[in-house]
Amino acid sequence: MLWKKERGSYTVEAAFIVPMVLGIAFMILYLILWHHDRCVLQADLQDRVFLMAEKEKKESGPIEELQKKMWIMIIDKKEISSNVLLIKGKVAAHSRVNIPLLTFMLHGSQKIELEETYPAKQPDEARRYRKKEEK
């Protein structure tokens, strides 16, 4: 009689545990993919700003070229601007997948907005330029 009483207990426990384990596994996978895309965006932005500062490349490539490297993000905007002293780059992207629980854990946002700044002139040249402007 004891045998028949415990027969379905493993099924009930598995019905609770398996969805939790799968949910955690998928959440970890999503965060890994999100972090990959963030690193790709950051590296691309740094490269483009640096190359523009070194006068090796004037314009940034099309968004489609960078979009091919992304796994779960869609690029909203990518812009690089420059003035006499600084070169500034900005990139923004959002997730293709909207997961409500994950949105809560990421503080309501599945967006990435990155900025990078690089000096267009050497520090001594920039100081001379600022002194000229002050006069």
Image (cartoon, rainbow, N blue to C red):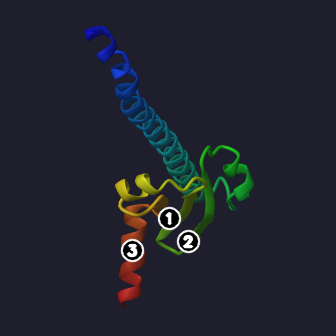
* Callout 2–callout 1 Cβ contact below 8 Å: yes
Give residue 61's quadrant in the image. bottom right
Q: Earlier in the sequence, mark 2 or mark 1?
A: 2
Residues at badges 2 and 3 in contact (C-beta under 8 Å)? no
Q: Hey, what amino acid is under mark 1?
A: Ala
* Mark 1 vs 3, N-terminal side: 1
Give the x, y percent position of residue 119: 45, 63
**Residue at label 3?**
128
What is the distance, in whole Å, between disc 2 and disc 1 at their CAs?
Answer: 8 Å
- Residue 120: assigned label: 1
Q: Residue at x 43, y 67 (%)?
A: 125
Q: Residue at x 59, y 54 (%)?
A: 48
Report, in whole angstroms, how far the alpha carbon at label 2 lies from the one at label 3.
18 Å
Q: Which residue is mark 2?
A: 82
Q: Position of residue 33 (x, y in %)?
A: 52, 40
Is disc 2 surrounded by few (<14), some (14 to 19) or many (20+) residues within 10 Å? some
Residue under the point 36% across and 15% down = 7
